[in-house]
Image (tube, grey):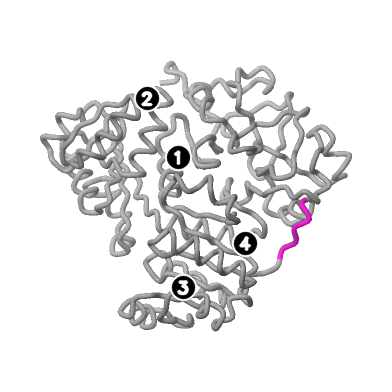
């Protein structure tokens, strides 16, 4: 059951409906509910998700999971509280954005309303930004195995010696260096590549690397790391503030441009080392005046997407080494590369990734969407009676469009072959196209006789 038919609720409902799961969406906004009903095969109820009557009518007692993802923290909390009274066995996930709740996540879990997972999109998006800052040239960075494995997306340049090469030819080109390419995005389509497939200039290539070998892997793409020392944040809202606090802790020089004078006063009071400026971050003369060309990274984090896009383009034009742009509208994503913006973060997409991790069948440790929502990277624990263990991978009935990209056994990371055997308790990294996720869930699930 999903309470909230906004962007996050809509996209999760769409994903789950595509996977043939039974979904009920509840929202008091009739227009939002109509959009869901028109676009997908799910049950919809027009009413307040915090109302006991509405939740009972929606079938809360039969629901395995409740996702409370409206734009109101209070509504989400009350929806979970009411669900806890009516159906204590239903697993509850809530989106809470207010910083006032940060210290109480444990209380919400241990006491009523017993929310299993609190998702704060702002915290998740700051984590994404920090990861992108640390990996030069990357347009997407994910982590598996508690950060020991990085999964990185990089555009292949036309001057790269990998352009035009087939995957089977890579060992002869890169020598002893290890590179596992898990997915390729070409013309907005995700491809899970095989040995005969070629890499083309302009492809977005996702590869997996152990953290300690990441710089070596990046050097294959002619990318060399330079430490980030100076950062400009445009937009001093909640995300900008959270990020500035983290940058201060890492002793990175940080400058913030914020339009609202009262917010500037708050930021100046709360931050210790950051320079806070009152002004318009999309004003070219102001950016020139503040030497934006000397910045290692310019991050545009206002609540207005057009301002973010414009300020990022200006920052690049004025010489900033790298820009990271916050975008909320999913419809803008495919346009970004075309206009010259490669590194994009989205609080909504960060929230969706966190939610997916908790609603997948099997023991899923993390789930990351690739290229919007066309594919997923999953880190899972191989359970004793699932179909994935105790036989060579070539004999596992993987659905088309899925591959095992890595096996983590205790402290060892294994790059798998067809002869590799997964053992119970191994952590397994799987890449799957959207259509293959349902099949992956089936082979990960514990068989009923296990109970």
Q: Can residue 385 be seen in this view?
A: no
Q: Residue under label 4, please give it.
A: 134
Task: Report the span colored magenta.
Answer: 221-225
Mark 1 falls on what kind of element?
A: helix
Does residue 372 appear left or right of residue 83 in this picture? right
Cα distance in 3D space between marks 2 and 1: 16 Å
Label 4 vs 1, first from the N-terminus = 4
Label 2 vs 4, first from the N-terminus = 2
Q: Where is residue 417 in the image (x, y as percent from the top left)?
A: 74, 29
Mark 2 falls on what kind of element?
A: loop
Q: Can residue 333 be seen in this view?
A: yes
Cα distance in 3D space between marks 3 and 4: 24 Å
Q: Are marks 3 and 2 in contact (CB under 8 Å)?
A: no
Residue 146 is a magenta residue: no
Q: Where is residue 252 in the image (x, y as percent from the top left)?
A: 57, 75
Q: Residue under label 2, please give it.
A: 21
**Mark 3 residue crowding within 10 angstroms, few (<14) / some (14–19) / many (20+):** many
Q: Residue under label 3, please give it.
A: 281
Is the C terminus in the top left, top right, bottom left or bottom right quadrant? top left
Cα distance in 3D space between marks 1 and 3: 36 Å
Which of the 4 quarters of the picture holds residue 205? top right
Label 1 vs 3, first from the N-terminus = 3
Cα distance in 3D space between marks 4 and 1: 24 Å
Q: Is label 4 or label 1 in front? A: 4
In this view, 320 is above or below 8: below
Label 3 vs 2, first from the N-terminus = 2
Q: Is label 2 or label 1 in front? A: 2
């Amino acid at each position: 059951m999903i309470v909230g038919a906004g962007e996050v609720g809509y996209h999760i409902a769409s994903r789950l409906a595509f996977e043939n799961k039974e979904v009920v969406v509840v929202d008091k906004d009739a227009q939002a509910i109509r959009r869901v009903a028109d676009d997908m095969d799910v049950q919809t109820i027009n009413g307040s998700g915090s109302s006991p009557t509405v939740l009972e009518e929606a079938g809360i007692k039969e629901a395995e999971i409740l996702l409370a993802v409206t734009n109101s923290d209070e509504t989400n909390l009350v929806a979970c509280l009411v669900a806890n009274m009516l159906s204590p066995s239903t697993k509850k996930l809530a989106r809470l954005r207010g910083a006032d709740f940060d210290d109480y996540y444990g209380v919400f879990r241990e006491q009523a309303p017993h929310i299993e997972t609190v998702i704060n999109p702002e915290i998740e998006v700051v984590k994404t930004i920090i990861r992108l800052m640390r990996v030069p040239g990357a347009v997407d960075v994910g982590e598996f195995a508690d950060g020991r494995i990085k999964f990185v997306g990089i555009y292949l340049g036309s001057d790269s010696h990998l352009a035009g090469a087939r995957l089977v030819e890579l060992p002869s080109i890169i020598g002893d260096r290890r590179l596992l390419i898990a997915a390729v995005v070409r013309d907005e389509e995700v491809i899970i590549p095989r040995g005969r497939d070629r890499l083309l200039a302009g492809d977005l290539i996702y590869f997996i690397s152990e953290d300690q070998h990441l710089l070596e892997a990046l050097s294959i793409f002619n990318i060399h790391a330079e430490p980030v020392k100076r950062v400009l944040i445009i937009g001093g809202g909640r995300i900008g503030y959270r990020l500035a606090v983290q940058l201060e802790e890492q002793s990175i020089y940080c400058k913030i441009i914020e339009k609202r004078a009262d917010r500037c006063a708050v930021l100046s009071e709360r931050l210790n080392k950051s320079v806070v400026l009152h002004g318009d971050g999309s004003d070219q003369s102001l950016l020139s005046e503040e030497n934006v060309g000397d910045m290692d990274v310019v991050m545009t984090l206002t609540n207005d997407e057009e301002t973010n896009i414009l300020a990022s383009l200006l920052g690049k034009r004025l010489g900033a080494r790298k820009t990271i742009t916050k975008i909320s509208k999913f419809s803008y994503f495919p346009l970004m590369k075309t206009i010259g913006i490669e590194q994009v973060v989205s609080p909504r997409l960060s929230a969706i990734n966190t939610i997916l991790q908790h609603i997948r069948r099997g023991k899923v440790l993390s789930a990351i969407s690739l290229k919007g929502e066309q594919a997923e990277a999953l880190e899972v624990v191989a359970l004793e009676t699932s179909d994935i263990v105790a036989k060579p991978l070539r004999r596992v009935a993987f659905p088309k469009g899925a591959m095992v990209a890595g096996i983590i056994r205790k402290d060892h990371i294994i790059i798998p072959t067809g002869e590799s055997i997964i053992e119970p308790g191994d952590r397994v990294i799987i890449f799957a196209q959207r259509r293959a996720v349902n099949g992956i869930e089936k082979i990960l699930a514990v068989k009923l006789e296990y109970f």
